Image (cartoon, rainbow, N blue to C red):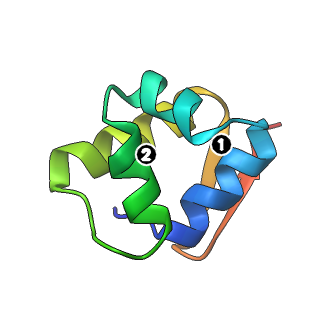
Amino acid sequence: MSISSEQSRAARGLLNWSQGKLSEAAGVARATIAEFEGGKRRPIANNLAAIRAALESAGVEFINGTGVKLRT
């Protein structure tokens, strides 16, 4: 399942993560995060999957393709 740029920003907000922190956790360039969240481009599939996996590993749940929450 894919995630939106809005979900990425919201998830980072829940975790209090910077784009740099997400970049490190996902193993992708910070520019990739910035361009994705800024709506400039969609990352290639493996980078998008790495972003999602990093956020999920930190406790974020993606809700019905539209929202995010922290796992309880």
At label 2, which amino acid type do we have? Arg
Q: Quadrant of residue 27?
A: top left
What residue lies at 67% left-to-right and 46% top-to-bottom? Answer: 12
Q: Residue 18 location, x and y as percent? A: 65, 38
Write down the residue under mark 1: 60
Q: Residue 24 location, x and y as percent? A: 45, 23
* First reached walking from the N terminus: tag 1 or tag 2: 2
Element type at mark 1: strand
Element type at mark 2: helix
Q: Where's the C terminus, which quadrant? A: top right
What residue lies at 18% left-to-right and 44% top-to-bottom? Answer: 46
User: Label 1: few (<14), some or many (≥20) within 10 Å?
Assistant: many
Instruction: Work out which residue is located at the far right of the displayed protein and give it.
Output: 72
Q: Residue 6 location, x and y as percent? A: 59, 71
Q: Would you place residue 45 above or below residue 24 in this image?
A: below
Q: Would you place residue 36 above or below residue 71 in this image?
A: below
What residue lies at 69% left-to-right and 35% top-to-bottom? Answer: 17
Q: Where's the N terminus, which quadrant? A: bottom left
In the depicted view, which residue is nearer to us: 9 or 45?
A: 9
Write down the residue under mark 2: 52
User: Label 2: few (<14), some or many (≥20) within 10 Å?
Assistant: many
At label 1, which amino acid type do we have? Val
Q: Quadrant of residue 53?
A: top left
In the depicted view, which residue is nearer to us: 41 or 58?
A: 41
**Distance from label 1 to label 2 (Cα)?**
9 Å
